[in-house]
Image (spheres, rainbow, N blue to C red):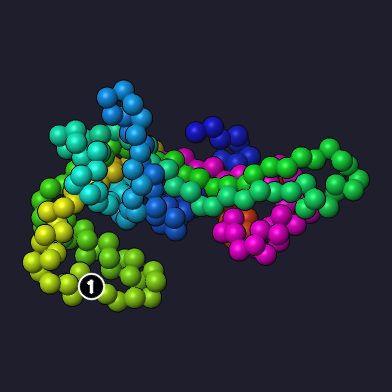
């Protein structure tokens, strides 16, 4: 991923907070010389100082058709994007050398994907997964509320996956190359439109041109 210095996320904590806030990942991998992708939600976890992303795939997913051997991949997380009009810049009246742009936030994770067939592993993963995301929506549903035979059948239809993280890179393109009054106005306009980018622009850890 090309990351000009003004847009580079230098805070590791902000990168991982972003991943947890935007857990729907696009997994990109190579299959017989062709690039393929799969999109799944993942659960961030940390163990012994190492970071992991856990999820599950439908057994029929082509990603599971390579003998379930470890697979190098790229995981992409997106935190929203928005068109930025030159009309939003206060300085446009004094200097017409402005053009439209597109603001966005993205994190790229590189690592190795490992597959899990063990039913106990998958069930423990699903209990943790559901508990975490139920809390995020104020719910309290639990896997064990569903009939055990039904869950057992579903477990057979999925494969557990774990991404062992090798590197993480963040790019937040949020008008850092514009004067401060312009950045404030862009943030205001994005906030009016309900864009998550406005919150990132207000975060003191977000890269700035200053």
Closer to the camera in the image, 81 or 106 = 81
Counting from the top left corner in percent of width and height, residue 184 is at 73, 57
Residue 28 highlighted magenta (yes or no): no
Q: How crowded is mark 1: few (under 14 residues within 10 Å), some or many (20 or more)?
A: few
Left or right of 189, for residue 50: left
Tell me the SS state at disc 1. loop
Where is 199 relative to 143, above or below?
A: above
- How many numbered marks, from 0 up? 1
Magenta-colored span: 168-197
Is residue 5 visible to us here? yes
Which quarter of the figure is the C terminus placed in?
top right
Residue occupying the point 77% across, 46% down = 86
- Image quadrant of residue 164? top left
Residue 29 locus on image (x, y percent): 33, 33
Indicate left or right for 205 with 168 as reference.
Answer: right
Q: In this view, does 37 lie to the left or right of 121?
A: right
In the depicted structure, whether residue 131 falls above or below residue 67: below
């Amino acid at each position: 991923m090309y990351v000009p210095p003004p847009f580079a996320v230098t805070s590791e904590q902000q990168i991982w907070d972003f991943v947890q806030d935007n857990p729907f990942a696009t997994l990109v991998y190579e299959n017989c010389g062709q690039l393929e992708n799969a999109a799944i939600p993942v659960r961030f976890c940390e163990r012994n100082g190492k970071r992991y992303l856990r999820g599950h795939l439908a057994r029929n997913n082509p990603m599971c058709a390579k003998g379930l051997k470890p697979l190098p991949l790229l995981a992409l997380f997106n935190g929203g994007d928005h068109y930025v009009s030159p009309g939003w810049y206060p300085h446009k009246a004094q200097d017409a050398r402005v053009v439209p742009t597109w603001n966005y936030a993205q994190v790229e994770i590189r690592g190795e994907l490992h597959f899990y067939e063990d039913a106990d592993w998958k069930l423990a993963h699903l209990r943790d997964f559901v508990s975490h995301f139920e809390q995020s929506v104020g719910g309290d549903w639990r896997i064990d509320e569903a009939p055990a035979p039904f869950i057992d059948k579903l477990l057979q239809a999925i494969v557990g996956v774990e991404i062992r993280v090798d590197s993480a890179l963040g790019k937040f393109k949020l008008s850092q190359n514009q004067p401060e009054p312009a950045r404030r106005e862009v943030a205001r306009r994005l906030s009016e439109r309900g864009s998550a980018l406005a919150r990132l622009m207000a975060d003191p850890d977000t890269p700035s041109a200053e």
